[in-house]
Image (cartoon, rainbow, N blue to C red):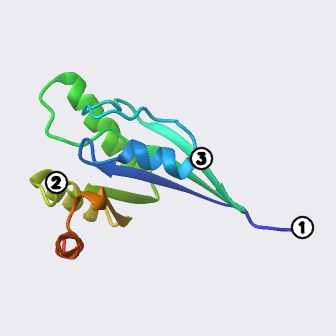
Amino acid sequence: MNETTRCGFIAIIGAPNAGKSTLLNRLTGAKLSIVTPKAQTTRARVLGILMRGTAQVLLVDTPGIFSPKRRLDRAMVAAAWGGADEADHALLIVDSKSGMTKAVQDIAERLGSTGRRISLVLNKTDLVERPNLLPLAEALAKL
């Protein structure tokens, strides 16, 4: 019984209210992160562990990334980027209903400049007409 165990660290990154906490909770099957319609509910990184066979995935739910004005806001955004900087892989979660906002563009460009692997997650697709999803995914893939 000489199985290799694998471990990876994945950061869940996105704008406020994109659905990062909901995704963490669904992937882990537990209520680890608070979910509310109020922006900036997640103020610090929340860690979840996903086990699949011999693989262990550490998922980190990060605060939403936005243009901070206050000291607390700057600390939350710094925590989000800290989670991304420490990760092996990033999940960029985008609210499909909000689409390609300036905030999403800025986040995608900064993540892209790190050289780290990034996966795009389009969330809330049930709130958008199907023909509008492909152009959004294509626009994000070009960043």
The kind of residue tagged 1 is Met
Screen quadrant of the C terminus: bottom left
Q: What type is the residue that disc 2 sits on? A: Ser
Label 1 neighbour load within 10 Å: few <14, some 14-19, many 20+:
few
Q: Nearer the viewer, residue 36 or 68?
A: 36
Instruction: Give x and y (percent) for residue 42.
Output: 35, 32
Q: Nearer the viewer, residue 127 or 36?
A: 127
Pointer 2 with pointer 3, Cβ within 8 A: no
Choose the circle earlier in sequence order: 1 or 2.
Answer: 1
Q: Residue at x 49, y 44 (%)?
A: 25
Residue 49: assigned label: 3
Marks 2 and 1: in contact by CB < 8 Å? no
Precedes in sequence: disc 3 or disc 1: 1
Front position among marks 1 and 2 = 2
Which residue in the protein does label 1 denote?
Answer: 1
| Residue carrying label 2 | 98
Q: Is residue 126 above or below residue 135?
A: above
